[in-house]
């Protein structure tokens, strides 16, 4: 693996102060893509609230957000605990409003369909689909009040399928369907919803040496041969929330070096 895969990438094109007096709710804010989104939004002047299960990870995000134009506050919560996450969204919505909701918390394991148990299937669907609906629905009144927007962090290949990810692709395809349906229902409220499909992103889970064979395969499946950086995902989230994204809704934007057009992960099912 080239060591440059994991280096910070300057993707910033948006202007300073863009999001002053705006507020965001970001799930999975304590690591990887979610942390990068928080840091960029705060840099652009936003008041960002973040959640995730591990408080120490959120603390680290807060440390890195210190001294920037906006603010970062947080509280740990499991997005799969419906009543708790609904209450948290209400608390944040009442306290600071919500101009932008980022559904980023998620994850899965790689396995051929024959090795996914019913419980494994349900876990992945619960985290990556049902919890996204719960959070989005809970945020609706606050998004409506601000004519806000939603960015759902999805997965490259969601509209085509991927070996080894039947459960996750099914969940994210469900999110895409939900996104397009709510984009229609909520257009009258001025609310926009989009999905972003990153390709391989070298975050915590993939950066460890043990994940190196998987990472090599993922890069092999990426025609441009370059993993997606967390910074370019963050910039796209910010762009979609900005005035320049005013008419963008119901979209799937894949930021993946053409992975969704490439050979796919055929090697996984062969194992
Ligand atoms: C078109 C081609 C495109 C090519 C490019 C692709 C681009 C996409 C690249 C995607 C890159 C992805 C990277 C990463 O994933 S990085 C790693 C990030 N970390 C994670 O994602 C971890 C996420 N995992 C979890 O959060 C949890 O494991 C999960 C929610 C999935 C389950 O949590 P839960 O606590 O509910 O689960 P349990 O541990 O109780 O287990 C429940 C059942 O699930 C089964 N299970 C768990 N792991 C596995 C496994 N590895 N294989 C098979 N089954 C598994 C477990 O056994 C339980 O079932 P049973 O009770 O029946 O045993
Ligand atoms: N890395 C990649 O290659 C790609 C990732 N993605 C997707 O991007 C999103 C971010 O992933 P990434 O940054 O890479 O990976 P991480 O594992 O770093 O991020 C996942 C985040 O979600 C949080 N999370 C997971 N489960 C829950 C839960 N039940 N309740 C609350 N928070 C939860 C985690 O925090 P905590 O554990 O503290 O709860 C963590 O901060 C995920 O949806 C992922 O599937 C999409 C394409 C490619």
Image (spheres, grey):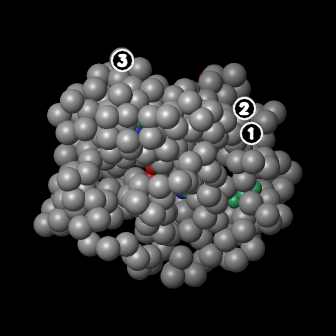
Q: Earlier in the sequence, mark 1 or mark 2?
A: 2
Label 1 CB less than 8 angstroms from ligand 1? no
Label 3 CB less than 8 angstroms from ligand 2? no
* Residue with the mark numbered 3: 83
Nearest the viewer among 17 and 268 is 17
Residue extending farthest front: 188
For the point 26% across and 72% down, the residue is 16
| Front: mark 1 or 2 | 1
- Secondary structure state at the residue bearing disc 2: loop
Q: Between marks 1 and 2, how big is the CA–CA gap?
A: 9 Å
The relative height of residue 122 versus residue 259 in the rendered view (above or below) is: above
Q: Between marks 3 and 2, how big is the CA–CA gap?
A: 28 Å
Residue extending farthest top: 83
For the point 52% across and 38% down, the residue is 187
* Residue with the mark numbered 2: 116
Rendered location of residue 226, percent (x, y): 62, 76
Label 2 CB less than 8 angstroms from ligand 1? yes
Rendered location of residue 237, percent (x, y): 45, 58
Tell me which corner region of the image, top left, top right, bottom left or bottom right, holds residue 177: top right
* Residue with the mark numbered 1: 166
Q: Are marks 1 and 2 in contact (CB under 8 Å)?
A: yes
């Amino acid at each position: 693996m080239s060591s440059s895969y994991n280096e910070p990438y300057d993707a910033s094109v948006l202007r300073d102060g863009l999001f002053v007096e705006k507020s965001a709710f970001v799930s999975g804010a304590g690591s990887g893509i979610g942390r990068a989104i928080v840091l960029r939004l705060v840099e652009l002047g936003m008041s960002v609230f973040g959640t995730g299960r591990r408080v120490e990870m959120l603390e680290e995000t807060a440390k890195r957000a210190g001294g920037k134009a906006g603010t970062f506050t947080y509280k740990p919560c499991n997005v799969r605990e419906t009543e708790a996450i609904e209450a948290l969204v209400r608390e944040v919505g009442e306290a600071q409003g919500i101009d932008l909701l980022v559904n980023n918390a998620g994850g899965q394991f790689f396995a051929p369909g024959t090795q996914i148990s019913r419980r494994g299937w349900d876990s992945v669907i619960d985290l990556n689909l049902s919890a996204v609906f719960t959070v989005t629905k809970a945020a609706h009144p606050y998004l409506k009040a601000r004519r806000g927007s939603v960015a759902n962090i999805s997965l490259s290949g969601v509209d085509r399928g991927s070996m080894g990810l039947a459960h996750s692709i099914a969940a994210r395809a469900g999110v895409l369907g939900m996104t397009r349906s709510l984009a229609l229902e909520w257009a009258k409220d001025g609310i926009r919803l989009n999905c972003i499909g990153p390709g391989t992103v070298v975050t915590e889970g993939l950066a460890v040496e043990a994940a190196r064979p998987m990472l090599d395969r993922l890069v092999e499946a990426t025609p441009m041969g370059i993993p997606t950086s967390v910074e370019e995902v963050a910039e796209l989230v910010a762009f979609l929330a900005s005035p320049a994204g005013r008419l963008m809704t119901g979209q799937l934007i894949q930021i993946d070096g053409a992975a969704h057009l490439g050979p796919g992960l055929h090697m996984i099912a062969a194992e």
